[in-house]
Structures are given as C-alpha cells and as structure tokens.
Amino acid sequence: MSLFNVYPLNPIAITKAAGSRVWDDQGQEYLDMYGGHAVISIGHTHPYWVKRIEDQLHAIAFYSNSVVMPIQEELATAINELSGKKDFQLFLCNSGAEANENAMKLASFHTGRKKIIAFKKSFHGRTSLAVAATDNPSIVAPVNETDNIIFLPLNDVLALENCFATMGHEIAAVIVEGIQGVAGIYEASTIFLQAIRKHCDGAGAVYIADSVQCGYGRSGQFFAHDIAGVDADIYSMAKGMGNGFPIGAILITPHIQAKFGLLGTTFGGNPLACAAALAVIEVIQKENLIQAAAENGAFLIHALENTPGVKTVRGRGLMIGFEMEAGLEEIRKVLLNEMKVFTGEAKPNVIRLLPSLAITKQDIDLFLNRLNIAIQHLKQTPA
Ligand SMILES: Cc1ncc(COP(=O)(O)O)c(C=O)c1O
C-alpha cells in the first residue's frame, strides 16, 4: 500500500450512502450517527444536492476568482438570510483550517497586532496558525510553534479579564468554538461568550467564532455562538456547509473593510462548490432542518440521560457527547462491529454523535435501541 499512513482506520470500505445509512463493499448496512465527522448536514447523497451539482457540472465547474461569479453572490445572500447576519461579508475557501487561518490573518491585518487568545482543549485545524492555536502539542510541528498564541481555560471569565487587562492592546483576536468538538463536546457558556464580546470591544480586538463543527444549524441554531445573544466579528464555517463537497468560508462583520489582495485563493468559491453549498441551504430551509436538529437533539439528549449505563451527556442539538460508566468503555467497538452503528469519539472515552440534521426520529429510536442492546451485551460479557 502506498498511502501515507496517518489514520488509524476501521477496516471497513464504505462504498454507498443515502440519508443516515451507509453500506460497505460487502453490502452490509450501517446507521451513521457520525456524519463523516459532522460533515453530512442534509443527508448522504440527498437527491436535490446531487442534481444541483450535476446541473452545475454541465454548465461550468471552475473558473478563477478573476471574473464576476453570480453564484458566489447568490450564496452570500442565502447565508446572510439563513444566519441572520444580514450585512456580513463572505469570503470563500476550501476547508475549516483554511477558514480559521484566514480569520486570524484578517484579524491581524485589521488590528495591526500579533497576539491571539485561544482556549485549552481547542481544535482549529492543521495549517500553520490554525494548528498553533490548537491545544495539542503533538500535532504542532516545530516550524508552527509561536509565542503569539495565548491559551486560557475555557469559560474562565476572570482569566480572560486579567489577560485583557495586562495586554489588551496587543490582542488581535480571540478564537473560540461555540461547542468544543474534538475536545469532547464542551460548551462555551453564555456569560463567557458575552465577556469575549465585551473585552474585544474594549480593546479593539476581533472576536472569531469557530463554527466549523458546531455551526451551520448543528446546535439547533445557525451558529452555536448565537445562544449568547451577541455577534462575533468573524464566523468560520466548513464541514456541514457542503454536505461533503469541500467548501469553507468566513463571514465577516461589515466594519472590517476589504482591500484588494488582502485574502485570496484559487479554488475557493468555485461554481461547483457554490452549487453544492446552495443546495445545502435550500434543503435546510425547505426541510426545516435547524428546528429539526433542535428538537431531535433535545429528544436524543434526554433519552441518553435516562439510559442506564450512560454516565454523562453533554451538548446541544445534534452535537452530542456522552461517557459510559466503568466497564462499558468498549461500547463504540460493540456499536460498530456488532450493532453496525458508526459513532465518533474524543479521547479518552467520549462517544460523539454528529448525525445528519435530517436524521429521522425512527433512526434515532433505532440508535437508542441498538445502544441498549450493546450495553446489555457488554454487561453480560465484559471486554
Ligand atoms: C472546530 C474545528 N475547527 C476547524 C477544523 C478544521 O477543519 P478542516 O479539517 O476542514 O480543516 C475542525 C475539524 O475537525 C474543527 O472541528
């Protein structure tokens, strides 16, 4: 095999998918509670999404950002409308890391400053500045190490206040996930997000809301950060935005002014990606998926809280993490291998649920049923 071996892979070849189901090359069906890492927003191979991409392919797949592209403007208007961030400006790129990289770079250009506040256990991506702002030294290469990132504890209003009091004039930006994903589903509190807004305003710093995983309706609101009732200056987005078609973006407050050459990309905002993203928004609206995420998520969280064997449950909407009681830590393996259910994980023992926002109530019941069987199985035959 000649692939660069960086992923610990499940020995399963997924070759077909529809809605919240996937099939392997042997025809075995699986229930997908993982959504390919929070990417599947409207459901695998949604027919409307497939058709819109297909139609776009026949018209034009790519041209560079040297010409006017009406489909980009159409997407910007649709995001303004769905997100409620009416006057915000859209810059399109290709991934979550790239979105955060551009967000932090823009904040630095805008303020003329270098320091960025990030939080313990955060994950912002693997490009140079995004990985430097990620609290995981094992994925930071020596060349990415920098003194410009300050890590503070999440939800510690006092630590934030102290940091701004001592060096507020040096801070370009604060970057925060509305709900930390890779960390194991930890929510930023409302008062903490409000404090970030206040201190950024006071010091002239930029509030960056990393919405790559928790955004695009997953939390039951378009942006998870919206729970605090204050706007960020920049929202980064990716994952659910294209339902699997690679696309990322930042949504930028009207008071940050664009200048030619400030940001740029070859592939970002290509017509094919925009068609995929427009299809996602149109389906979210037509099928009322943000409300569905809120309702189905609340139901699933409540059911998990009442499942014997489940120790703790965290999260909002369809971004859920739970931990099992002692002796049941192998539950993910049993769910996958025996109950044919894909879930996500966060080390050491958090099971993450990030299903399609279009998952049906029947599939949620099916998951809960299989989870209960898996728990019984583990209780009878401990690993
Ligand atoms: C919160 C958050 N930000 C950024 C990223 C990076 O996104 P990408 O893998 O598309 O570069 C991720 C990916 O998991 C993420 O969860």
Image (cartoon, grey):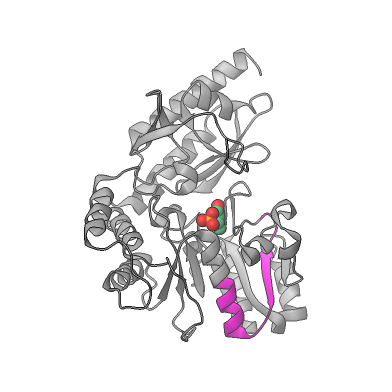
Corner quadrant of residue 45: top left
Tell me which image quadrant ligand 1 sits in: bottom right
Q: Position of residue 307 (x, y in %)?
A: 53, 29
Q: Is residue 89 left or right of residue 162?
A: left
User: What residue lies at 36% left-to-right and 65% top-to-bottom?
Assistant: 270
Vertical side of 22 occupied by 291: above or below: below
Q: Nearer the viewer, residue 207 or 316?
A: 207
Residue farthest to the front? 2
Rendered position, 211 above or below 186: below
Q: Looking at the image, is 356 positioned above or below residue 171?
A: above
Q: Position of residue 164 (x, y in %)?
A: 71, 77
Q: Determine if residue 119 is in view.
A: yes
Q: Quadrant of residue 198?
A: bottom right
Q: Residue at x 42, y 65 (%)?
A: 267
Q: Nearer the viewer, residue 87 or 195?
A: 87
Question: At 75% from the left edge and 80% from the top edge, which residue is drawn?
Answer: 167
The residues colored magenta run 103-121
Quarter of the view holding residue 204: bottom right
User: Does the magenta segment cover residue 373?
Assistant: no
Please check the rendered image and state whether residue 106 is part of the magenta-colored stretch, yes or no: yes
- Quadrant (top left/top right/bottom left/bottom right) for the C terminus: top right
Q: 115 or 247, which lies in front?
A: 247
How many numbered marks are there? Answer: 0
Question: Can you give x and y, in whole percent of width and height, for residue 207 in the image?
Answer: 57, 73
Res. 217 in view: no
Question: Is residue 364 left or right of 77 when viewed as pictured?
Answer: right
Image quarter (top left, top right, bottom left or bottom right) of the N terminus: top right
